[in-house]
Amino acid sequence: MNPVVLITGASRGIGAATALLAAQNGWAVAVNYATQASKAQGVVDHIVAHGGQAKAFQADVSVESDIQRLFAEVEREFAHIGPLRGLVNNAGIVDQVQRVDEYSFERIERMMLMNVISPLVCCKEALLRMSTRHGGTGGSIVNLSSVASRLGGAGQYVDYAASKGAIDSLTIGLAKEVAGEGVRVNCVRPGMIDTEIHASGGLPNRVREVGPQMPLGRAGSAQEVAQAIVWFLNEDSSYCTGSILDVSGAR
Ligand code: NAP
């Protein structure tokens, strides 16, 4: 039997790096993706080729019925391997650079749906399976925030920063709420990390242009963030819950 972890948005970037490292640490990995099936399958193939266990699951985690289907499928497909004991709320979005006085309602709604409501619903579905209150055997939830939650994102994306502020609060509150139910809840707050998220916000050269201005003189890698996420997943961090760890090179 191996513990099972569900990682949302694990087809690329930080989620993919976390999937590979979690598998090396003995987790059976449910690799969620939205649209990029071949990339998700590439992550799964890499894990399986190295002797691990993984499967790809398509689901748009901004849709409640997709989230419910995702958790049910993961439970069913991994039933012979072990119980769901890990959730990494990784999938997240940015948007184009805009001031708040330029935002459309639809932009704000999409940001909050994807970056706040979705992780909350995923926490709910995970707790229904992990919490001893619901007959589970415990587990570990890791949420992806951002240093934007304390920097504020002024002139760039205040909505994104605010959505990540909500993730910090969710982590602190939920950790206390389920501390007696075998579930730990922690949060990793990356700084500027070299992934495709910047291009999706219309800034494909952001890491190259701004990375050298970071205190360490470079952006971080997805693998460096994955190390922190997997440490929180593992029992090595057994006395950490409600913790928020910056992986931001002093930014
Ligand atoms: P990324 O490279 O843009 O990857 C995003 C991942 O999320 C992809 O696997 C994508 O799947 C998935 N995804 C997007 N929308 C989805 C949806 N509706 N349903 C399911 N999956 C969805 O992102 P990243 O840079 O690795 O960021 C991961 C997390 O770290 C995010 O929460 C982000 O806010 C946070 N973060 C990143 C940075 C940074 O500088 N990179 C800094 C601070 C915080 P497809 O491939 O199928 O589209």
Image (cartoon, grey):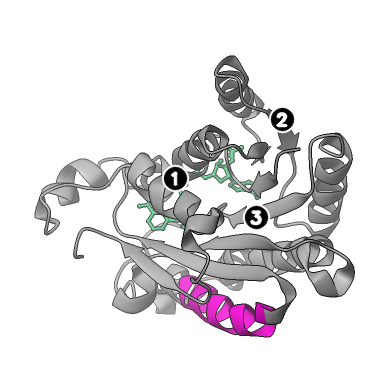
Q: Is the CB of mark 1 within 8 Å of ligand 1?
A: yes
Tag on residue 200?
1
Identify the magenta region. 163-179
Indicate which disc, 2 or 3, sits on the residue closer to the N terminus: 2
The 10 Å Cα crowd at callout 3, few under 14, some 14 to 19, many 20 or more, is many
Magenta stretch secondary structure, dominant: helix
Q: Position of residue 71 (x, y in %)?
A: 81, 50
Tell me how far mark 2 sits from mark 3, CA to CA.
Answer: 15 Å
Residue at the spot of label 2? 55
Does residue 134 sit above or below 51 in this rendering?
below
Q: Residue at x 43, y 46 (%)?
A: 226
Could one spot residue 128 in this view of the protein? yes
Q: Badges 2 and 3: C-beta atoms under 8 Å apart?
A: no
Residue at the spot of label 3? 87
Does residue 73 sit above or below 215 in this rendering?
above
Q: Position of residue 4 (x, y in %)?
A: 71, 44
Tell me how far mark 1 sits from mark 3, CA to CA.
Answer: 24 Å
Indicate which disc, 1 or 3, sits on the residue closer to the N terminus: 3
Considering the image in quadrants, where does the C terminus appear?
A: bottom left
Q: Residue at x 89, y 40 (%)?
A: 76
Kindly state the secondary structure of the residue where label 2 is placed: strand
The 10 Å Cα crowd at callout 1, few under 14, some 14 to 19, many 20 or more, is few
Q: Amino acid at mark 2?
A: Lys
Is residue 117 rendered to the left or right of residue 197? right
Q: Position of residue 177 (x, y in %)?
A: 68, 84
1 or 3: mark nearer the eye: 3
